[in-house]
Amino acid sequence: MTIGIGLLGLGTVGAGVAGILASPAGRHPLVGELAIKRVAVRDLNRPRPIDLPAAILSTDAEAVVDDPSVDIVVEVMGGLEPARSLILRAIAAGKPVVTANKAVIARYGEEIAAAAAAKGVYVLIEAAVGGGIPIIEPLKQSLGGNRITKVSGIINGTTNYILSRMADEGAAYGSVLADAQELGYAEADPAADVEGADAADKIAILTALAFGGSVPRSAIPTEGINRLDARDVGYAAQLGYVVKLLAVAENPGGAANSAQSAASQALDVRVHPTLLPKSHPLAGVYGVNNAILVEGDPVGQVMFYGPGAGAGPTASAVVADILNIAGIWAVARPGVAGPGASGAGAALDPLLAASRWRQCHLIDSAQTRHRNYIRLRTSDEAGVIGKIGSCFGAAGVSIQSIMQFEAQGERAEIVVITHEVLEANFRQALLAIEALADVQAVEACLRTL
Ligand code: NAP
Ligand code: HSE
């Protein structure tokens, strides 16, 4: 029996999915059972990289969801609306959904999960985080016995591609971003990539899976690479670091804290450019690749690595989710691979049914502990470094290194790297430093691992 696919979107990811389904030879036999029945697009006249009968294309996305020949709805159109409403419409009709839309899941995941659980249908989201890297299913299942203490990673392909080419070739930010758009890595509005929102959506999703409860998406402190100065990338390199856009979700108390049955688990979740020592496992992740480091008790550290964006890798994850559903249908009624194969409720996704098993909230950022990099513009006079050091000392901030990089005329550039310190103390030191007559500006302030 054929399983009818309704594609909402035929852009980078949608065309990638259609490409896989159009060439089943050599793939899992169930791929041959999948047939694209209807496709929703915005513009019927746009040239497409894949040949599909014109009659199955429509600008009426609701009609695609409602079409009786569509058994699984694949949402790859992006944006919040109408994507959210279409997903809920499919669920209401009892149709499983596969989506790559992290923006919708990060904001409306709980609403969608509740609707799916009530209706007993799957909503699978492997493509929403990490492109072609399997990370959702491992967090849901394979690592389920662990107390997760930290999830950190490079989870935006566009920005990693930009940073890699800027560091390797000295390429200009604007032209590399244009290349990332051309290659299909960037979001429809690339501000989501370079301002960090896409990575924040993804870490919100990973947080909910890893820690069993979500934190408000809008509260996640988020800083992108759009204000990153090439000088800092250069200085970082001279000091033995690479700069990456890192997304982090951690339980600051570690495994012991995770074990406590606190009413609400305090988490430090954030996205920001970060100096990584060149020896760090995430430092060698270049180009469009992503990597996610999961730390748990008792597993230790597990790293997931691979292409994080683009048509092929993302379509690989989408098709895997479709096959998951098709496979369950096939097992439920051997020989009848199709939607009639499972009873109502039988296909409930364990993630959606049981993943939210505790409350989580963001820790007060002043109480977090980090290493920091700051770059100051100062006057080039005797005693300036001493005064800066005194400000740090008075606030209880221990300095790892302090260097003067450049002096031009009466102007100097000073870079400080701190040890791991309480954020509240660091902010207090910065205020005192900004007030020094010799300090003209704090020009950069970045996290360091
Ligand atoms: P895209 O290239 O911009 O494609 C979007 C598709 O959706 C286009 O075919 C567009 O139609 C269609 N569409 C948009 N709004 C529509 C509407 N209201 N009604 C009907 N059709 C509509 O986007 P993409 O890169 O494939 O990304 C799709 C989703 O996957 C997004 O949620 C994105 O975040 C996610 N994702 C993307 C990647 C990646 O590497 N690109 C990776 C992981 C996840 P037209 O073609 O007619 O304009
Ligand atoms: N724009 C996203 C990225 C697509 O660059 O990572 C993959 O989610």
Image (cartoon, rainbow, N blue to C red):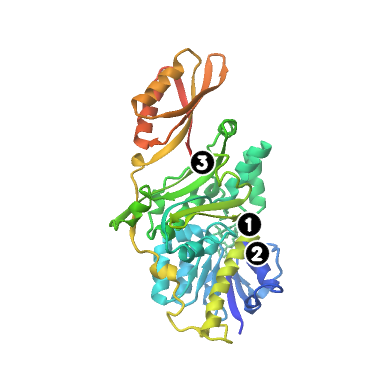
Quarter-of-image position of residue 42:
bottom right
- The location of residue 343, given as percent across then percent down, is 45, 84
User: How far separated are the C-alphas under marks 1 and 2?
Assistant: 9 Å
Q: Is mark 3 within 8 Å of ligand 2?
A: no
Q: Is mark 1 within 8 Å of ligand 1?
A: yes
Q: Quadrant of ligand 1?
A: bottom right
Q: Looking at the rendering, in which quadrant would you find the N terminus?
A: bottom right
Q: Earlier in the sequence, mark 1 or mark 2?
A: 2
Do we see residue 55 in this rendering?
Answer: yes
Residue at the farthest left position:
263
Q: Which residue is mark 1?
A: 310
Could you tell me which secondary element the residue under label 1 belongs to?
loop
User: How far separated are the C-alphas under marks 1 and 3?
Assistant: 22 Å
Label 2 environment density (alpha carbons within 10 Å; few <14, some 14–19, many ≥20): many
Q: Which residue is mark 3?
A: 273
Could you tell me which secondary element the residue under label 3 belongs to?
strand
Q: Is residue 259 above or below residue 318?
A: above
- Tag 1 and tag 2, C-beta contact below 8 Å: yes
Q: Is residue 354 above or below residue 297?
A: below
Q: How many marks?
A: 3
Which residue is nearer to you in this view: 155 or 184? 155
Label 1 environment density (alpha carbons within 10 Å; few <14, some 14–19, many ≥20): many
Q: Is mark 2 within 8 Å of ligand 1?
A: yes
Please name the residue shown 46% across and 48% down the image.
248
Q: Is residue 320 above or below residue 267?
A: below
Q: Which residue is mark 2?
A: 16
**Nearest to viewer (mark 1 / mark 3):** 3
